[in-house]
Image (spheres, rainbow, N blue to C red):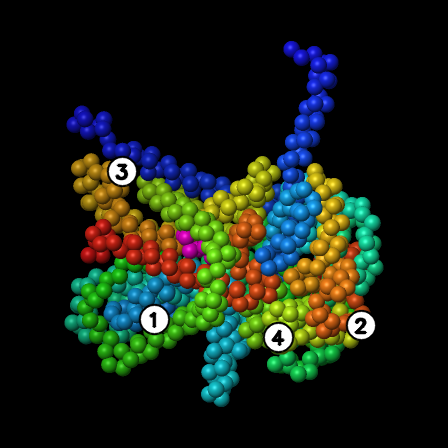
């Protein structure tokens, strides 16, 4: 029988052994993310390699099919989630994610960011950003509309493809863009726009691949950075974004630490790493978005040939939290009337 | 005598027929019920207010409307095509066309939509052809037109295939008499074809209605906008992005009531027999039909030709764009395509086999039961997966399982399980007829000879079932192979299956590889169908059914 004193004497040894064991069994950092980040042609694989070189750990991506799905899975799993970090939420899902109470503060002092807006958030760390824009086929359109107003007023034989704000991030982006520009008149403007909408797809990829690339419509709601991919990788200038006078709605993609994680320190180390060139250099061509820090010469040349919106439009996150549902319903009403 | 009662054949006890099927059907009821219940338990908003919203009512109206139109369109096209095919029992490419008709059902919808757009879209082949002829495309694909076109593309071949099989079962002597009387086309329809088709039409209509009612990817892509939302789409949106479990559960119940009610009516009439093709084609055995000569012959040929084009063109469009990339890249052994193919097969093959086993057990149990509530429940349970959306089943299961097991390790097994349940309505239709085909007198003689249990299965059932089983396996496997809904919920896309790989490529500007993947997936599905239909046709074992 071991008495109390003996037990106390062995405890430090046991704890020491445990520590040694943990040091040798590499900790695993589980990251919930979306497919375009983790796919073999996305930034994920290179970033995993770069981070694992310095962290003595294993980075494991659990890939869910969209930013919305990440949030959905997190909510379903609650505090029992196996995620240590979520990467791939954005400015429109941020507040809903914050409201779950499942995310922890990042506790970092962020380096100088290169975002079009000032970023002060205790929970979410941005890793890339982009503007929503209409991308058009230069072989079908010579003079695209120069403003959202002009697009709304264009004749109905100009066909566009948009995405559903209930299921797609760019779709929600356009909803907010219209709301930001037209305010209370947004629903009338949606009705004016309706005749030009060839179809509303569930996801960006359905519209871009099955329809836009098939030449079904000359214009599609996408990102101002989309042409960068076509120019740099496909080597074609055929697809360009149309600059709109009112400015463009901004999307910032973010990551955050999960509160229930037992690897919070490691997760914070990853967030720290996220804002270094070793992470950020993979963003421009592999995620086809703007990097969150200034990459200097490392930014691919094609990014100099993208449109530069005069204004970055964005609602404060609280406005989204309070009004998103109403705005979506208003859109539904306008479109089914 | 003494020895016979004690050494009864293996598995001869009645419970061996009854228990597995009852257990399975109980499990299916439990899973669907549990899935729905789990959603309701999570619900926290006001159901009554939800029910009264104008948007929801619009969605329900539109869903019923488009499904009804799709059923009408599919059946009206299927009937003349089936009659034409029956009038011409042998022409080159006929069996190829029949395979194509069987396949239409399992073609992954995102692939089919892409093919349809390439042919019938604003910049498709047809539009180009018309432009060259100085005309314009007479329709706008997006909206109800597109939905109907796609639904007819999926369902008319299925309906026609089943009708061909039904019409070919008309006994030869009836045909001979009709032939001797020199009946015209309209009279033949009244005397021979309509009486043969009438019993299968309600079940067929219910099947097509359910398939169109629950249609998802097609409606989303070709529907045009929120005006064209079906209940299934609304459920997806509610679950995926609004976290509105209430709305999802309510909508799922509406779907269950409408489609379930329809199936209940069909079951009550007992008109759901042998609806899917069992590939038992009788070639050339029929008396020549008097309505297959002269100008009717040319009209039939034109009709069959048009229908074949309608089915083949979208497939060709996919191959046309996919093959160049595939040909260039297939040699690369590091290709993500290989891993995805293996993973897909690792899910789809067990799912297909499980679907067949579940089906046989369910059929054995329904056969052994007397008419009554347990029997009806066992019959209906197999059709539940058609009308309870997989995403509801999936999310419900997720809520039920996840807190206990942690989903990571069970993911693929759960995917295979749900996939096999989803295939049940189809495998049931394939196997039901052949399973019940032994006549009462055969069974009585078998009883007297003590051919029961395992021996009855081996010598009486299996020879008849071998061929339909391979077809059922084909349906089960390929349906799972093309599945995206369930895998999206449970799988880990770091290790994608083929449909996931396709979606990932589409999401990342990988247009050329995506066309390659779509083409590869289609090729794989074709290969599985051809291979299995060859397997089922091995000589000597399958002669009973179609001698």
Chain identity of mark 3: B
Q: Which mark is in front, 2 or 1?
A: 2
Residue behind mark 1: B81
- Residue B400: image quadrant is top right
Instruction: Work out whether residue B242 or residue B68 is closer to the camera in this orientation and state it.
Output: B242
Residue behind mark 4: A236
Question: How busy is the neighbourhood of tag 1: few (under 14 within 10 Å), some, or many (20 plus)?
Answer: many
Q: Does residue A170 appear left or right of residue B14 in this picture?
A: right
Q: Does residue B536 appear left or right of residue A184 in this picture?
A: left
Q: Do labels 2 and 1 share a chain?
A: no
Q: Which mark is in front, 4 or 1?
A: 4
Sequence order check, earlier mark of 2 and 4: 4
Q: Do the residues labelled 4 and 1 touch (CB within 8 Å)?
A: no
Chain identity of mark 4: A
Residue A3 magenta-highlighted: no
Residue behind mark 3: B454
Mark 4 to mark 3 CA distance (whole Å)? 67 Å
């Amino acid at each position: 029988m071991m008495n109390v004193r003996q037990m106390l004497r062995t405890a430090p040894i046991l704890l020491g052994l445990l520590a040694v064991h943990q040091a040798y069994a590499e900790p695993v950092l589980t990251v919930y993310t979306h497919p375009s980040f983790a796919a073999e042609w996305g930034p994920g694989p290179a970033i995993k390699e770069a981070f694992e070189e310095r962290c003595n750990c294993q980075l494991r991506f659990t890939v869910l099919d969209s930013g919305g799905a990440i949030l959905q899975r997190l909510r379903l799993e609650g505090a029992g989630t196996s995620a240590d970090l979520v990467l791939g939420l954005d400015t429109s899902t941020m507040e809903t994610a914050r409201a779950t109470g499942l995310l922890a503060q990042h506790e970092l002092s962020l380096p100088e960011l290169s975002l079009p807006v000032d970023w002060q958030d205790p929970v979410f760390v941005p890793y890339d950003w982009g503007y929503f824009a209409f991308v058009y086929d230069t072989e079908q359109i010579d003079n695209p509309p120069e403003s959202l107003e002009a697009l709304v007023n264009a004749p109905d034989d100009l066909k566009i493809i948009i995405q559903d704000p209930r299921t797609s991030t760019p779709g929600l982006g356009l909803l907010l863009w219209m709301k930001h520009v037209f305010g209370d008149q947004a629903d009338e403007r949606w009705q004016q726009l309706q005749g030009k909408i060839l179809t509303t797809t569930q996801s960006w990829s359905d519209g871009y691949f099955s329809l836009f690339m098939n030449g079904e419509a000359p214009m599609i709601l996408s990102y101002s950075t989309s042409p960068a991919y076509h120019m740099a990788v496909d080597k074609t200038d055929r697809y360009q974004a149309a600059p709109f006078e009112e400015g463009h709605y901004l999307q910032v993609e973010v990551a955050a630490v999960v509160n229930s994680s037992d690897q919070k320190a490691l997760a914070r180390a990853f967030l720290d790493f996220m804002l270094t060139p070793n992470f950020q250099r993979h963003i421009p061509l592999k995620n086809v978005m703007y990097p969150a820090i200034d990459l200097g010469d490392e930014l691919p040349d094609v990014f100099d040939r993208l449109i530069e919106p005069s204004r970055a439009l964005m609602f404060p996150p609280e406005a989204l939290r309070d009004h998103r549902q109403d705005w979506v319903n208003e859109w539904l009403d306008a479109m089914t009337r | 005598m003494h020895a016979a009662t004690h050494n009864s054949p293996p598995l001869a006890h009645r419970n061996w027929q009854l228990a597995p099927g009852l257990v399975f059907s109980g499990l299916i009821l439990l899973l669907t019920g549990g899935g729905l219940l789990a959603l309701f338990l999570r619900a926290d908003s006001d159901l009554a207010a939800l029910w009264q919203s104008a948007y929801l009512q619009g969605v329900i109206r539109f869903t019923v409307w488009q499904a009804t139109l799709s059923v009408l369109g599919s059946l009206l096209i299927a009937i003349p095509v089936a009659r034409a095919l029956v009038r011409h029992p042998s022409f080159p490419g006929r069996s190829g066309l029949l395979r194509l008709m069987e396949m239409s059902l399992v073609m992954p919808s995102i692939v089919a939509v892409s093919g349809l757009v390439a042919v019938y879209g604003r910049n498709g082949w047809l539009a180009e052809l018309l432009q060259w002829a100085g005309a314009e495309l007479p329709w706008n694909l997006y909206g109800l037109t597109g939905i109907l076109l796609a639904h007819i593309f999926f369902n008319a071949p299925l309906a026609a295939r089943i009708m061909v099989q039904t019409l070919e079962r008309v006994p030869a002597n009836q045909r001979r008499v009709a032939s001797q009387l020199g009946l015209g086309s309209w009279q033949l329809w009244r005397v021979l074809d309509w009486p043969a088709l009438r019993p299968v039409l309600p079940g067929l209509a219910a099947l097509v209605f359910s398939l169109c009612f629950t249609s998802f990817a097609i409606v989303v892509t070709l529907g045009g906008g929120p005006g064209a939302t079906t209940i299934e789409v609304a459920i997806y949106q509610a679950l995926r992005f609004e976290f509105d479990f209430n709305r999802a559960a309510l909508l799922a119940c509406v779907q269950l009531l409408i489609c379930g009610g329809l199936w209940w009516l069909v079951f009550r009439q007992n008109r759901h027999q042998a609806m899917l093709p069992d590939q038992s084609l009788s070639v050339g055995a029929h008396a020549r039909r008097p309505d297959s000569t002269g100008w009717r012959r040319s009209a039939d040929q034109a009709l069959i030709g048009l229908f074949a084009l309608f089915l083949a063109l979208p497939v060709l469009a996919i191959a046309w764009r996919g093959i160049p990339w595939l040909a260039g890249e297939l040699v690369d052994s590091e290709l993500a395509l290989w891993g995805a193919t293996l993973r897909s097969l690792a899910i789809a093959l067990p799912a297909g086999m499980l679907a067949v086993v579940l089906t046989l057990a369910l059929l054995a149990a329904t056969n052994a039961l007397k008419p009554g509530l347990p029997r009806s429940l066992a019959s209906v349970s197999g059709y539940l997966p058609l009308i309870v959306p997989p995403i509801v089943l999936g999310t419900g299961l997720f809520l039920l399982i996840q807190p206990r097991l942690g989903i990571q390790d069970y993911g693929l097994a759960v995917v295979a399980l749900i996939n096999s349940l989803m295939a049940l309505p189809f495998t049931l239709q394939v196997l039901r007829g052949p399973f019940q085909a032994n006549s009462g007198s055969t069974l009585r003689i078998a009883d007297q000879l003590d051919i029961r249990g395992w021996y009855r299965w081996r010598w009486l059932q299996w020879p008849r079932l071998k061929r339909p089983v391979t077809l059922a396996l084909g349906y089960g496997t390929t349906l799972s192979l093309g599945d995206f809904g369930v895998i999206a919920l449970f799988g880990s896309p770091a290790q994608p299956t083929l449909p996931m790989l396709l979606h990932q490529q589409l999401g990342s500007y990988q247009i050329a590889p995506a066309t390659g993947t779509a083409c590869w997936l289609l090729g794989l599905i074709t290969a599985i169908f051809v291979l299995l239909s060859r397997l089922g046709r091995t000589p000597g074992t399958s002669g009973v059914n179609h001698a």
